[in-house]
Amino acid sequence: MLQVKSGQLDQLGLLFERHNRSLYGFFYRLTTDTNASEDLVQNVFLRIMKYRHTYHGDGKFTTWMYHMARNLFADHYKKQKRMGYKEDVETTDRYFKDEVNAESSRIQQEEIDLLQQALDRLPLEKKEILVLSKFQEMRYKEIADLMGLTESAVKVRIFRALKELREVYEKLETRSSIY
Amino acid sequence: MEEQYMSLITDYIDGTLTADREREFRQYVDEGHIVMEEVEAMKQMQGVISAAESPEPSEAMSEGFYTMLAEAKRKEKVKSPGFLDQLSQAFFSTVFGRMAFGISLLVIGVLAGMSFGGSNDGSQMLALTEKVAEMQQTMMFSMLEEESVTERLKGIQMSNELPRSNKKVTDALFMTLNNDESTNVRIAALQVLEGYADDPVIREGLINSITRQESPLMQVALAELMVELEEKKSIDQFRQLLESENTPDEVKTTLEESIGKIM
C-alpha cells in the first residue's frame, strides 16, 4: 500500500510535466498575474496530492484537475475582491503606453496584448469558457462535464462569448488606431 | 437569435459541422437567420486567438513543485519505518513469530524455485532489471550535470528509484550535496541521503558535509538531522561553524541548542 502511494507520488511529477503549462495558461489568461498564476498551479498540484485517493479514474483526469483549478481560482477571485482589488489601470493601459514607444514590427505582440485586454473586459463566465475552449483547446464535452451543462449549452455560451469578445476587440482596435 | 443557430455557428467556425448540419446551416443562411458577415468576423476572431502565444511559466514554478514533491516523499518515507517496525515486531518478538517468518521464507523460496527453475526466464529477468537500473543511473548522472535546477531536482528524484547500496549513486548525491549552487537541489540531495543514514559510510559523509555548507538553511537542516540521529561525532563540526564569523547569529543559537540535545 505504501509502495502504491509512493508510486502515485512519482506519477505526480509526470502529471506536472504534462499539465503545468496548460494550467498556467488557464490561470494567466484569467488573472494576467504571473506570480498569482504560478502559485495557483502549485496549489492545484498540492490538492491533487492531498486528494489523490478520491480520484477513482471515473471521468477524465483533466476534468478532475480543472475542477480543482476552478475552485482555487474562485477562492483567489473572492479574496482579491475582498481586498478591494480593482482592475489595475496600469495593466489596462499598458498596451497604449507601449504603443507610443513600440516599433511597428511588434504587430503580433500588440495583437496578443489587445486580445488579453479584450478578454479582461468580458464578464468572468464568458472569459472562462473562452479560455477553456479556445485557448486551452478543451473539448466541449469536457467543458460540459466540468460545468454541469449539456454540450449544446456549451456551444451556445461559446457563441455568445466569442461574439462579445469580437465586439470588444474591435472597439479597442479602433481606439488604438486613433492614437 | 435563437440558440439552435448559435450552436450551429460555433460548429461552423470550428469546421466540425456534419453534412446534415451543414445543409441546415446553409438553409438558415439563405433564409436570413444567420448573417454570414458576422460569422466570418467571429471566425477571424478565433484566428487571432489561435495565433496568440501561450504564456510560459518561469522555472521557479517547476523548482517549487519538485521541492514540494521531495518534501512529500520524505514525509511518506518517515511513515514507512513505523510499518516495518510493526512487521518486525510481529515476526521477531515471539518464538511463534520467528517460526512463521522462517516458514514463509521457505515457502517463498520453494515457489520461486518452482517458477524459475528449469528455464532461464529468471536470469533474463534479472539481467533486464540490471540493465534498466544501469540506464536510470546514467540518466541520473547526466541530469545532475544539467544547467537547469529543475532537471537536477528530477535527477535527484530519480536516484530514489535506484538501489541504495550503489556507491556511484551515493557519491553523485554527495557531490551534489556539497557543491550544487542551488539550495533547493542540495536540500533534495540531503533528503535522499538521510534515508541511508544507517549506513556508517553515508553517515560519515553527512557529518563531513556540515562544515562545507554555507547556507543557513542547510546548516540548520543538517543540525536537525544530527539531533535525530543522536550523532556525537558531528559536534566538532558544529563547533567549527560556531567559531566561524560567517555563520549568522540565529544559526549559531540553533546549533548550540542542537549540540545540547545531542550531548
Image (tube, rainbow, N blue to C red):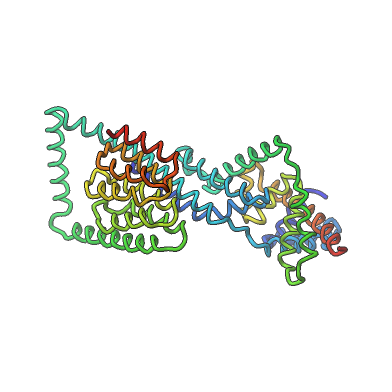
- In the image, taking residue A37 as reference, residue B217 lies left or right, namely left
Among the 4 quarters of the image, the one containing residue B14: bottom right
Q: Nearer the viewer, residue B72 or A23?
A: B72
In terms of depth relative to the viewer, which is nearer, A97 or B106?
A: A97
The picture places residue B125, in percent across and down from the top left corner, at: 23, 58
* Spot occupied by residue B257 in the image (x, y as percentages of width and height): 36, 33
Relative side of B249 to A44, left or right = left
| Residue B258, image quadrant | top left
Examine the rendered structure and indicate whether residue B138 appears above or below residue B262.
below
Q: Residue at x 56, y 47 (%)?
A: A41
User: Does any portion of residue B29 appear in the rendered image?
Assistant: no
In the image shown, does B99 or A32 lie closer to the viewer? A32
Percent coordinates x, y for residue B229 in the rendering: 28, 38
Which residue sits furthest bottom?
Answer: A105
Please report the residue visible at 74 percent of the width from the left and 63 percent of the height from the top: A111
Which one is in front, B246 or B26? B246
The C terminus of chain B: image quadrant: top left
Q: Position of residue B100 (x, y in %)?
A: 15, 33
Q: Is residue B135 visible?
A: yes
